[in-house]
């Protein structure tokens, strides 16, 4: 919180070195290339979780991020398969389309508050899953399968991202690209929170009526924030579909929406990097518990409950609570 | 047409009971109980074990389901929700806890009862047939009547007993209730246990018709959320109305829309979203819960 600029830069630099240099070296050294998939998933899911966190920031419990991730994944898959577009072009389009949908849906439902908003977004996830099952273009329950790997992306003849289909190690490439996206997302989120919009969001989190009485157009801010949040969800989902090379209606369902919310809670709602930490702990923890075989779910659930029982304000609250006490 | 109406009543009665438990817990604790569907499944499995496997009479099995769930509910409130709600900076943290409990109960069900679909022998044989206009098995009639009886008993309990009055007061205003000398902690536990008990009771009743399996938990929770949203969160009459409305919608949808594919629920969801955009607090809810 009250870190100096220098130590902030140091932490950020350390994190980047760790993610982009240390982990690839470690994996190539230990030969556990299956970690790439896990870590790539963590990076992508944390992008979607960042969106959920942003809606928390205006005081809304969002359990509908799975819906937007699924929309993003389908938009990319359909554009690649039916229109033959380059995946890297469809990625921003998926995000924009998702944001557009979220504006349409958000206009009525953002008027709801508290538990009502939570429940309606939960229902929204179910609506999108059912729509994907019913529409002909999404190919129903069979889903869209064998999507080709992303082609190369070049601007004015300069290759930015090589053709992933011909690479020896597409896993590493996917990992690096996902991490770049993740870093960008959290950078945007950090800037957003520390901007004027972030301050408006904080005021809305505390009291919307008061915020509107001093001249903030709360309806407009709500829609903007919800659209940004869904944009993150769409990007994360679209990239996830490209890595899995397939999209099914069950790719993102109610359980995933709840997981996104849990990631934010577990990391701590008061801290920008909470969802990143939460996603990492939950996803990695689940994978590590694989050795317990049939007791995996039991132990996992117990850990979540115990964490919530003793740290109800999130993992980062250990620091957070000390700081708050000082400032009181 | 008569058949559809009868199906609607039957579905509505069972849905109303599921929604009652959820709305009770919500009104008392302001907790959205994600684990409600899992509690329902546990109730079903307890009845299955006692009635289906051990061959003990159905009524005893039902009581065992209620008893098990009441204990689970009381323990969960006393040792998990109560302390967390007191310590947490934001009351939404209870949602993570509820989701965690849903996972835990899923794990427990998986370990104790396995993942197979289970059914029990019918409690009453035969089919009621009125001139081929209404065809309904006798066991469904029995279950439907039992469900309606339980709803009436629950309302009477809430309305006329001392415990019920205390619970209603607690739902209205926690602090005022405490000032009137009600032991708030104790009645929170009782209320949570009662809500869980209702879930177990429905589970026990419905296992005789639909059977029970591990995957039923989350869809049941979602249906219960929908009913609560239709009727208004935290209002008992709203939960009953929501359950009956959803039951009828489903009965009509299955009768008239099934030729267009599986779109009944899609339409119900979309209608619900439009409805909530116009009336956010549901049919009978207080504005902003």
Image (cartoon, helix red, strand yellow):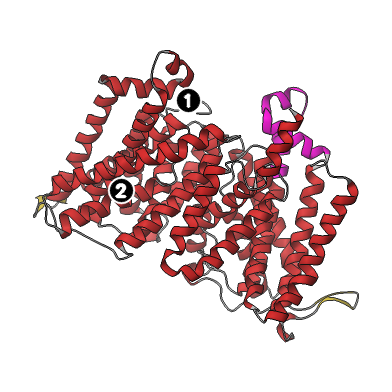
Q: Quadrant of the C terminus of chain A?
A: top right
Query: The magenta stretch spans which residues?
Result: A196-225
Graded by Cα atoms within 10 Å as few (under 14), some (14 to 19) or many (20 or more), the crowding at tag 1 reads: few
Q: Residue at x 60, y 64 (%)?
A: A284
The local secondary structure at tag 2 comes to helix
**Quarter residue B186 falls in:** top left
Q: Where in the figure is residue B66, as x and y percent of width and height?
A: 25, 42
Res. A133 visible in picture: yes
Disc assigned to residue B251: 2
Q: Main secondary structure of the magenta part?
A: helix
Res. B8 visible in picture: no
Q: Quadrant of the N terminus of chain A?
A: top right
Residue B78 lies, with reference to residue B55, above or below; the image says: above
Q: Which residue is mark 1?
A: B286
Label 1, label 2: how far apart the Cα atoms are = 29 Å
Q: Residue at x 62, y 77 (%)?
A: A34
Q: Is residue A210 magenta?
A: yes
Q: Is residue B205 magenta?
A: no
């Amino acid at each position: 919180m009250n870190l100096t600029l220098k130590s902030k830069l140091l932490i950020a630099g350390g994190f980047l070195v760790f993610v982009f240099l240390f982990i690839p070296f470690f994996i190539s050294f230990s030969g556990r290339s299956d970690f790439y998939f896990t870590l790539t998933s963590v990076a992508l899911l944390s992008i979607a979780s960042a969106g959920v966190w942003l809606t928390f920031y205006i005081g809304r419990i969002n359990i509908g991020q799975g819906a937007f991730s699924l929309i993003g994944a389908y938009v990319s898959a359909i554009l690649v398969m039916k229109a033959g577009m380059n995946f890297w072009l469809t990625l921003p389009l998926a995000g924009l389309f998702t944001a557009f949908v979220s504006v349409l849906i958000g206009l009525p439902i953002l008027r709801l508050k508290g538990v009502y908003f939570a429940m309606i977004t939960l229902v929204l996830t179910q609506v999108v899953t059912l729509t994907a099952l019913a529409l002909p273009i999404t190919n129903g329950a069979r889903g869209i399968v064998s999507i080709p790997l992303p082609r190369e992306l070049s601007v004015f003849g300069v290759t930015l991202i090589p053709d992933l289909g011909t690479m020896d190690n597409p896993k590493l490439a996917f990992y690096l690209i996902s991490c770049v996206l993740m870093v960008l997302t959290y950078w945007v989120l950090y800037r957003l929170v520390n901007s004027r919009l972030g301050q408006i969001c904080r005021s809305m989190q505390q009291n919307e009526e008061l915020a509107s009485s001093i001249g903030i157009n709360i309806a407009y801010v709500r829609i903007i924030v919800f659209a940004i949040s869904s944009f993150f969800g769409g990007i994360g989902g679209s990239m996830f579909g490209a890595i899995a090379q397939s999209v099914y209606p069950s790719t993102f369902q109610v359980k995933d929406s709840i997981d996104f919310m849990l990631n934010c809670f577990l990391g701590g709602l008061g801290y920008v990097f909470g969802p990143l930490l939460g996603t990492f702990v939950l996803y990695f923890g689940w994978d590590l518990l694989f050795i317990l075989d049939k007791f995996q779910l039991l132990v996992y659930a117990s850990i979540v409950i115990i964490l919530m029982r003793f740290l109800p304000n999130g993992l980062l609250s250990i620091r957070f609570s000390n700081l708050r006490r000082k400032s009181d | 047409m008569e058949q559809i109406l009868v199906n609607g009543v039957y579905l509505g009665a069972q849905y109303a009971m599921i929604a009652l438990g959820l709305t009770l817990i919500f009104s008392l604790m302001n907790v959205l109980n994600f684990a409600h569907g899992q509690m329902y499944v546990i109730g079903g499995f307890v009845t299955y074990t006692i009635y289906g496997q051990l061959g003990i009479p159905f009524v005893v099995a039902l009581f065992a389901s209620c008893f098990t769930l009441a204990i689970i509910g009381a323990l969960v409130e006393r040792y998990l929700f109560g302390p967390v709600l007191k310590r947490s900076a934001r009351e939404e943290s209870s949602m993570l806890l509820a989701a965690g409990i849903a996972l835990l109960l899923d794990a427990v069900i998986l370990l104790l009862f396995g993942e197979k679909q289970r059914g029990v022998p019918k409690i009453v044989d035969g089919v009621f047939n009125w001139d081929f206009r209404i065809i309904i098995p006798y066991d469904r009639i029995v279950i439907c009547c039992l469900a309606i009886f339980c709803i009436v008993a629950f309302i009477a309990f809430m309305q006329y007993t001392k415990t019920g009055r205390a619970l209603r007061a607690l739902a209205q205003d926690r602090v005022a209730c405490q000032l009137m000398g009600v032991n708030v902690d104790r009645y929170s536990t009782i209320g949570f246990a009662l809500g869980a008990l209702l879930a177990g009771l429905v589970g026990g009743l419905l296992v005789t018709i639909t059977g029970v399996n591990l995957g039923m938990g989350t869809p049941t929770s979602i249906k219960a959320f929908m009913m609560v949203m239709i009727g208004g969160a935290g209002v008992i009459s709203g939960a009953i109305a929501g359950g009956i409305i959803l039951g009828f919608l489903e009965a009509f949808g299955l009768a008239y829309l099934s030729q267009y594919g599986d779109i009944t629920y899609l339409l119900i969801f979309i209608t619900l979203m439009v409805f909530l955009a116009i009336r956010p607090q549901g049919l009978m809810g207080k504005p902003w819960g």
